[in-house]
Image (cartoon, rainbow, N blue to C red):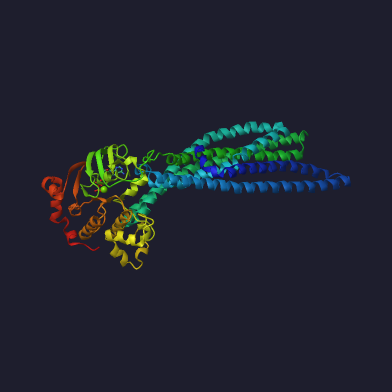
Amino acid sequence: MFKLLKYADKYKFYAFLCPVLMIGEVVFELLIPQVMANIVETIRLTDTADAAVQSAAVNDIFLYGGKMLILALCSLFCGSLAARIGSIAGMGFGASLRLGLMEKIQTFSFSNIDRFSTASLITRMTTDVNTVQNTFLMLVRGFFRAPIMLITALVICIRKSPDIAKVFAVALPIIILFLAIFAPIAIKRFRAMLKKFDGFNASIQENFTNIRVVKAFVRTDYEKEKFKKSNDALTAAAIHAEKIMVLGEPALILLMYFTITAIVIIATKSIAEQTLDVGEFTAIFTYAFQILTSFLFTIMILVQVFMAEASAKRIGEVLYETPDIKDPENPEETVSDGSIEFKNVSFSYGKGSDVIKNVSFKINSGEMVGIMGATGSSKSSLVQLIPRLYDATSGEVLVGGKNVKDYSVYGLREAVSMVLQKNVLFSGTIADNLRWGDKNATDEELKNACEIADALSFVESFPDGFNTDLGQGGVNVSGGQKQRLCIARAILKKPKILILDDSTSAVDTATDARIRASLRRLAPNTTKIIIAQRISSVSDCDKIIILDGGSISDIGTHEELLSRSEIYRDIYEAQQKGCDDFDSVGGAS
Ligand SMILES: Nc1ncnc2c1ncn2[C@@H]1O[C@H](COP(=O)(O)OP(=O)(O)OP(=O)(O)O)[C@@H](O)[C@H]1O
Ligand SMILES: [Mg+2]
C-alpha cells in the first residue's frame, strides 16, 4: 500500500496540510471541555447571596460562552477546510493511480494482457482503486487526528483524575483484545468478497460485450442463471462479511458504555468525597468520550488499511508487471525493406508447450505469400511474431535483414501493418477509424486505400460517406464491409509488410480476388502475407507456406504444392467438391 504512495506525490502539499489543519481542529476541540468546566463552576457561584458576585458570575458565563463559541467556530473552520483539502488529496491520488494503471496497461504486450483477464483489469482500475483511495482519504483525514486526540485527552484525563484514568488502563486492552479477535475474521471475509467481485464483473462484462452472440444463441436464460449465480455468490460473501460487523459494532458500543458507567461510578464517589468538583467531572466526562471514540477510530483506520492492502496488492501487480516487449538500448528506427526471415523459430504461450516448432523460411521484399493450414495449426501465432506482438521463445525473426528485437517497437510496427483475425472498429466515423492508420491522411489517401481494399463503392453508397458513424465496435457495417475497412486502415500506414490474417473470410471470392489484384498492382513493393482458409485466396501467391501442427509442412507455388503436398491437395479437392460452390459464383458485397 505504501509503495503506491508515490502516486500521491502531486498532492503532497494537500496531504500534509490536511493533518495540520486536523491538529488545529483537535486543539480547539480539546479546549472546549475545559471552558465548559469553567462554566459549570461559575454557574454554582450564581447561587450565592452576594449580588455583586452573582452579576460577575453571570458576566463570566457569557464570557466563557463566547469563548466556547469562538473555539467551536475555529474547530469547525479547521475541520471543514481539512475535509476539503483531504478530498482534493484523496481524489487526486485516485485519479493519478488510475492514470498510472492506464499508462502501464498500454505498455503491456499481448502476453502481459493474457496474464490478467480484461474483467480483472477493470475491477482493479475501479473497485480496487476506490478502496485504496478511500483508505488514503481516511488516513489523511484521521491518521493524525485520532491518535493525537487520544493521547492528549488521555494525558489531560490522567492529570485531572488518576483514579478515572485507571478505568482506561483496563478498558483499552479489553477493546484491543476484542478487535484482535474480530478484525482478522472481518478482513478475511472482506477479501473473499473482493474476489467474488472479480467473478461478478467478469460475468457481466462477458455478457455485455457479447450480447449479440448471447441473443443469437438464445442463451439469455442461461446467462441470467449465470448472472444470478455470481450475484448470489457476491451477496452471500457480502452478508458473511457484514455479519461480523453487525456483531462487532454493538459489542464495542457495549464495551464503551461499561467504561462510561465505571467512570461515572468512580466520579460519583470522588465528588462525594470532595476530591473532584462537578465542573471538572463534566470536562473529564467529555474527554472520556473523546478518548474512546478516537481510540476506536484509530483501530478502524488500521483495519481499513489491512483491508485495502488486498486491493493495493492487486493494483501493484499491474503497476509493477514488467512489459515483456521493450525497446532495446539503441533501437533501429527504420525498417529498410519488407524482407522476412525466420531462423529456427519456436514459440509457446506462457508455460505451455511449443505451438511453433523450429520454423525456418525466407520471404523476399515485395512478395505475396500465402499461409494455409488447418485451424489451430498456428498460422496466427506465426505472423504475430513479425510485428513483435509476441516474442519468439527461441530462434530469430528478421525483418529487413535485422532481428525484430533490434528495432524500436514503434518503428517496427509502423513498418508492419497487420489486420488481426479478430479485428475491431471503434466508435466514430469511418474516416476517424481509417485515420488510425495515418492520422494525417488526406481525403484522397483515404479514398485510395478504400479503393485497394474494395471498400470505396459501399462507403460512397452511404448517405454520409466517409462521415458515416460506425457505432460502438463498428456495429453499423456488415462483417465483410468491416473486414474491408480494416484492410483499408492497414493499407493507410503504407507499410513495408502487410499481414492479412483471415481478413477476407467474410467477403466473396470475386471481391477477394479484386483486393489481391489491387494490392499487387498498387503496392508492389509491400510484402504481403495472406492467411486464408480458401485455396482461391492464396493460389496466385508467389509462394504458399503450409503449416501443420506448428511446423512447416511445405513451401511452394500453387502448382508445386498440388503436385507434391498431400495436405494442400486434400484441401484443394475438398473445396473443389463444393465447399466453395457459393463463393465461386460470388455473393453479395
Ligand atoms: N493467447 C493464447 N494463449 C494460449 N494459447 C493460445 C493463444 N492463442 C492461441 N493459442 C493456442 O495456439 C495454437 C495455435 O493457435 P493459432 O490461433 O495460431 O491457430 P490458427 O492456425 O491461427 O487457427 P485458426 O485457423 O483457427 O485461426 C492453438 O492450439 C491455440 O490453442
Ligand atoms: Mg488464426
Which residue is at the far bottom? Answer: 463
Residue at 26 percent across and 57 percent down: it is: 522
Residue 233 in sight here:
no
Examine the rendered structure and indicate whether residue 388 appears above or below residue 162: below
Which residue is at the far left? Answer: 563
Image coords of residue 192 (percent x, y):
44, 41
Relative depth, front residue between 416 and 301? 416
Horizontal arrangement in the rendering, residue 131 relative to residue 406 (left or right): right
Residue 576 in sight here:
yes
Image coords of residue 175 (percent x, y):
59, 35
Image coords of residue 82 (percent x, y):
62, 46
Relative depth, front residue between 554 and 171? 554
Image coords of residue 47 (percent x, y):
83, 45
Quadrant that contains the C terminus: bottom left
Which residue is at the far front? Answer: 336
Horizontal arrangement in the rendering, residue 360 relative to residue 36 (left or right): left
Q: Quarter-wise, where is residue 331 in the image? A: top left
In this figure, what is the number of numbered marks?
0
Horizontal arrangement in the rendering, residue 567 relative to residue 524 (left or right): left
